[in-house]
Image (tube, helix red, strand yellow):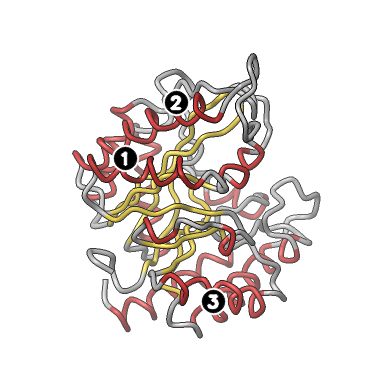
Amino acid sequence: MNSLAPYVAGMTWGFMGVRGTWGNEAADRSMETMVKSTGVNWTAIAFSALQATAFSTEIPYWKEPTVTDEEVRWAIGKAKSLGLKVCLKPIVNCADGTWRAHINFFDKDVPCEPKWSDWFASYRAYIVHFAEIAEETDCEMFCIGCEMVQTDRREREWRELIAEVRKVFKGLVTYNCDKYQEDNVAWWDALDIISSSGYYPIDDWERQLERIESVVQKYEKPFFFMEAGCPSRTGAAKIPNDWTLIGDVNEAEQADYYHTMLQKCGERDWVRGFMLWDWPAQLYAPKQAAADDGYCIYGKQAAAVVAEAYADKLNLFGR
C-alpha cells in the first residue's frame, strides 16, 4: 500500500477544527494523551470549512471558525513529532446545521439557480489549498472529501479534482464515502485507497463486510475505515451514526460495540485498519469521562479495548 503501514491503527483528531483551539497547551496535551492511551500509529487531522446552506456555492475556508493554515501546520508537526503518520482531512459542513451529505444542485444548469460548476470551483480551491499544505508538511495521505453522498454521482467533477490534487500532492489520495455508499462510488479507480465511514449496527457487521468486500475485489484497491465508532450511550450500538440519539451514558455498550467491530473486521485481512471517531483537541478531564456520552473513548472502557486490539495488530504487522 505504498507508504501506508500494513495496518492503520488510527484515530481522528481535532474535529471540528475551530479557530483558536489548536496550537495551544490543551491541544498539545490532547494529542499526546491520544497516543499514550490508544497506541495509534496514524492520525487523521480533521477540520471543517462552512458554507452557509446545502445550496450555497461558496466555501470561505479562510474565515472563522475554520482553523488557520498555521494551526493546521502545527497539528501536522505535532503528530509527526509523536511518530505518527498523517492523513490531512479537510471537510465541508453547512453553517445552518444541514448535514453535508445533502449538499446538492440541479444536474442541469438553470439560470438564476445555484450550479454544480460554481460549487465545485469553490470546493476545488479549498481542497487543493490544503493538498498543497499536506505536501509541504510531508503528510502521507490526503482525503479529498467526506460523506458527500449527493455529490458522489458527479463523477467527472470528482475525477477532475483528483487530477488537480495529484498535481500538488505526491502521497496517497483517498475519499471517505459515507456508510452504505461504498458500492455507489464509480470513481474508486482514480484513487489509491477506498475508505468509508463504518457506522454499522453491532449486529450487522458480517452482512456489510460481505457487501464491501465485493467492492474491494472489483477495484483491487486497499481498504480501511476512515471513520468508525460509537457513542457511549444506551442504544447507540444499534445506530452508531446517530449523534443526536437520546440515551443514558453507557460505557459498557460502547466498549462492547468496539469489541465486536474490531473482532469482525479483524477476521477480514482486506480491512487494513481504522481512523476511529474521534478525539477532540480540547479534551475533557479524566474525572468527566464517566459522564461523557460522546464518541471519544478517553478514560472509558472502550479505550482499553482499542489499545489492546491495536497493540495486537501492530505486533503482528509492525508500525
Q: Residue at x 38, y 35 (%)?
A: 127
Q: Residue at x 48, y 34 (%)?
A: 48
297 left or right, relative to 167: right
Q: Mark 3 vs mark 1: give the one in front.
A: 3
Q: In the image, which disc is placed on residue 214?
A: 3
Q: Secondary structure at mark 1?
A: helix
Label 3 or label 2, whichever comes before in sequence order: 2
Looking at the image, is 179 positioned above or below residue 118?
below
Could you tell me which quadrant the N terminus lies in?
Answer: bottom left
**Mark 2 surroundings: few (<14), some (14-19) or many (≥20) residues within 10 A:** some
Q: Amino acid at mark 1?
A: Ala
**Mark 3 surroundings: few (<14), some (14-19) or many (≥20) residues within 10 A:** few
The x and y percentages for residue 255 are 62, 69
Q: Secondary structure at mark 2?
A: helix
Q: CA distance from mark 3 to mark 2?
A: 34 Å
Q: Secondary structure at mark 3?
A: helix
Residue wearing tag 1: 75
Q: CA distance from mark 3 to mark 1?
A: 36 Å
Q: Amino acid at mark 3?
A: Ser
Q: Mark 2 vs mark 1: give the one in front.
A: 2
Residue wearing tag 2: 122
Q: Residue at x 64, y 14 (%)?
A: 112
Q: Residue at x 48, y 49 (%)?
A: 279
